[in-house]
Amino acid sequence: MKELPVIARAQSYGSTVALRSDDVERTYSELLDRSATLAVAVLNGSDDLNESRIAYLIPTGLDYVTVQWAIWRAGGVAVPLSLSATEPELDYALTDSTADCVVTTRSLAERILGLCERHDQRLMVVEDVGDTDCGSLPSVDPQRNAMILYTSGTTSTPKGVVSSHLNIQAQIESLVEAWKWQASDSIPLFLPLHHIHGIINVMSCALWSGATIDTFPRFDIDAILNRVAERAYSVFMAVPTIYVKLLQAVGGMDAGEKQEVVSGFAGMRLMVSGSAALPATVHHEWTELTGQELLERYGMTEIGMALSNPYDGERRPGSVGVPLPGVEVRLMSESGEVVDAEDEPGEIQVRGPSVFVEYWNRPDVTADSFSDGWFRTGDIAVREKGYLRIMGRQSVDIIKSGGYKLSALEIESILLQHPSIQECAVVGVPDDIWGEAVAAAVVLQDAEQLTSDDLKMWCDDRLSHYKIPKRLRVVSGLPCNAMGKVTKPDVQELF
Ligand code: MCA
Ligand code: AMP
């Protein structure tokens, strides 16, 4: 039987340590054995899952990789669920993906059991799968679909981005080549594992290369800095908010502790920032503190990583560099012409084997997202001395906060369900820590009152905590354009 490339590569690393979680270590062989057992359990008697969707709610740690590999080895499509999702958000992902089965851990089973019962979906608890299950696994063609990740955007509900095994392989190989991943690398993994920054850039690139991953169930800054001080890592990847938080934390340390941490960072061979714009000030402060020049790159769930500052060569603050290996990038002007000149803005469009297959069950949205085979990212950039610089997005409805992409429309549609709210407009406002913070201007029903705390409490069950408006402005009427429609850039001026 021909194994998927991800699995075949892991087989070649045998007794090397793949994952470390607290003080527990797992070798590549151990992960492979366990994933084969779990694959048989997921198959549940069938020969091949034939691209059935298998959702999983699993914390970052040893089980995550084995469950993902098990789904792939059984021929299924992996649908990772967000650990910070509310019940309605989980319900949406399970319903939209039409998952057949949900895999989880004993401690999380309670959160998902009711939904599985309601949707008649099988619930599999990893701890209930013994080590005795064995059986044959199907041969999976890499052209088949591998993963669905949910991403917010210019629609009011998140869309499922479908990637094939070949797409994922292309995304990994491009980064392994550009950033010189090697078996001797060691990296901390603390990013959420329902987005590609954590799944592809950190976890999959490391496992493809035979490197070692140190897993943290959340961004536990003290635990991570302790390991940095022990010089445990050669590579580090994070979103800009994390570098801001690290600067604050290291700034507050006493001299001895600070020296250990700083030299841990200084000794790494690569530190990367992405998912949102890295302010040039943060780039400079980080270099001043650690001597490291952060490598900023640009990507998107639909395409993997597309642009990167070079590994060797100038890493320019405020810029996202040049196309990565295997990725074609062009800028398209508003009038529909390819922009080759410097200093002229255009939409970033991307083509190549890393570009996703489709939006799940949304053929019209998929078709609208491509122009002559090029994926239209909706991000505007300009070419300056050969490097691209991101200028912003075409749509004000997309907010990037803490590295998460949020849809203003989705948040508005939830706020409008509040009995006191008659009208609302959600915008992202500049924020030194989060990049952008969610802000909402609301018009209340007559004689109603609403405070930020009331609204926060009401949102708690409906929206993940980073989507809850951090700033609320009650207004008597929203700024409108000549047509009487709310104009969001004006709303932004309210905050
Ligand atoms: C949390 N808080 C916020 C936000 N998030 N406040 C404002 N805006 C936010 N976005 C508040 C909480 O309500 C809480 O408040 C306090 O901050 C601490 O929250 P917590 O979640 O514990 O914070 P944290 O653990 O420090 O998390 C920050 C984080 C996390 C580590 C930066 O947001 C994160 O992991 N972000 C990365 C997301 C990511 O991986 N994106 C990549 C997507 P209180 O104390 O009052 O309760 S993939 C992508 O974008 C593309 C493909 C790409 O290019 O990579
Ligand atoms: P997501 O949909 O969560 O995959 O987020 C992708 C979006 O993140 C892109 O379309 C960009 O708007 C943004 N993004 C990613 N990296 C960068 C970067 N280095 N600078 C500015 N924006 C970025």
Image (tube, grey):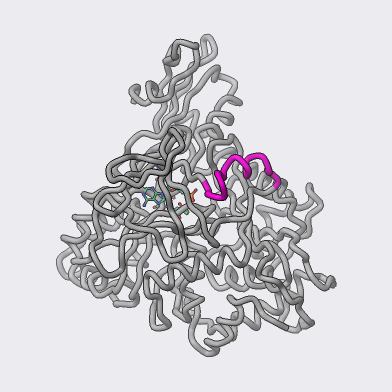
Specify the quadrant that holds the C terminus.
top left
Where is residue 66 drawn, in percent x and y?
A: 62, 73
Indicate whether 207 appears above or below 486: below
Instruction: Give the residue drawn at x 59%, y 43%.
Output: 158
Q: Is residue 400 visible?
A: no
**371 displayed left or right of 90:** left
Q: Could you say which is closer to the camera, residue 255 or residue 42? A: 42
Q: Could you say which is closer to the camera, residue 213 or residue 196? A: 196
Specify the quadrant that holds the N terminus.
bottom right
Instruction: Give the residue drawn at x 40%, y 48%.
Output: 402
Indicate whether 475 appears above or below 45: above
Where is residue 165 drawn, in percent x and y?
A: 62, 67
Where is residue 325 drawn, in percent x and y?
A: 43, 66
Residue 70 drawn in magenta: no
Q: Is residue 118 visible?
A: yes
Instruction: Give the residue drawn at x 78%, y 48%.
Output: 119
**145 displayed left or right of 174:** right
Residue 372 drawn in magenta: yes
Give the magenta-colored segment's residue range: 361-375
Most distant residue in the bottom direction: 15
The image quadrant of residue 76 is bottom right
**430 displayed left or right of 354:** left
The number of discs equals 0
Instruction: Give the residue drawn at x 61%, y 38%.
Output: 157
Q: Could you say which is closer to the camera, residue 364 or residue 199? A: 364
Indicate whether 229 appears above or below 119: below
Where is residue 441 drawn, in percent x and y?
A: 44, 23
